[in-house]
């Protein structure tokens, strides 16, 4: 499989994970989420879908670039991709905890682990391919913001 095919496979995988996370989110956005007290810096709801779509595409490109190096650096690439898969699963789990279970506290604890896994993925990707590492930075920054937002929502609604 060539580089472009690998990138497309991972981008599609990320977008599918994002889609299924959105399924859990959609019903809560119109029912439960509007009832919460939110901080003044809470973005409008419409911003989340385009931001997440772009982040999933960037993550997929990053992972595809890493996967393309598997023939040259097999062990570190495999390890980096395991971290990527774990953080992607944790990303989906956060939506289920926050919107599905309607549990900002549990989601807040989980997002800390997610952030650490994203950071470790970024670190491992950067050692293999600098561009792949750079592509993970917006995701890390957005989840940093989401962590503060999650904690604020939990605090304001306890």
Image: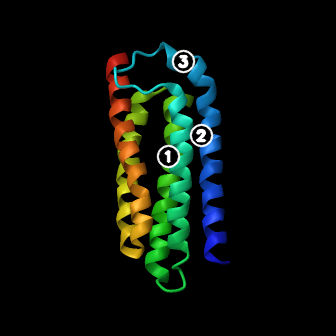
Q: Nearer the viewer, residue 28 or 59?
A: 59
In the rendered image, residue 134, in percent from the top left (x then y), is placed at: 39, 61
- Name the residue: 54% across, 28% down: 46
Q: Residue furthest bottom?
A: 72
Name above or below for residue 122 compared with residue 77: above
- What is the distance, in whole Å, between disc 3 and disc 2 at their CAs? 16 Å
Return the x and y of residue 93 as percentages of the image width and height.
52, 42
Give the residue at x 58% y 23%.
28
- Could you give the CA–CA distance between mark 3 and mark 1, rounded to whole angstroms? 20 Å
**Side of 104 where 152 appears, left or right:** left
Q: Badge 1 is on which residue?
A: 91
The dot on residue 21 is 2
Q: Earlier in the sequence, mark 3 or mark 1?
A: 3
Picture layout, residue 96 above or below residue 74: above
Find out whether the residues at labels 1 and 2 contact each other: C-beta distance under 8 Å.
yes
Q: Can see residue 158?
A: no
Residue 41 vs residue 101, the one in the foreground: 41
> Label 2's element?
helix
Q: Which class describes the residues within 10 Å of circle 2: few (<14), some (14-19), or many (20+)?
A: some
Q: Position of residue 65 (x, y in %)?
A: 52, 71
Q: Which mark is residue 32?
A: 3
How many marks can you see?
A: 3
**Left or right side of 105 for 11:** right
Viewer-proximal residue among 98 and 58: 58
């Amino acid at each position: 499989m060539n580089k472009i095919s690998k990138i497309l496979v991972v981008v599609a995988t990320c977008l599918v994970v994002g889609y299924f996370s959105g399924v859990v989110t959609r019903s809560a956005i119109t029912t439960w989420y509007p009832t919460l007290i939110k901080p003044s810096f809470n973005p409008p709801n419409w911003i989340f879908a385009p931001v997440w779509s772009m982040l999933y595409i960037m993550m997929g490109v990053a992972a595809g670039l890493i996967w393309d190096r598997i023939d040259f650096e097999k062990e570190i690439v495999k390890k980096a991709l395991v971290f990527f898969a774990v953080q992607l699963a944790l990303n989906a789990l956060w939506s289920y905890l926050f919107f599905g279970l309607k549990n900002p506290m549990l989601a807040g604890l989980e997002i800390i682990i997610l952030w650490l896994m994203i950071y470790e993925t970024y670190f491992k990707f950067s050692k293999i391919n600098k561009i792949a590492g750079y592509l993970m930075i917006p995701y890390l920054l957005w989840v940093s913001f989401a962590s503060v937002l999650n904690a604020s929502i939990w605090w304001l609604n306890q």
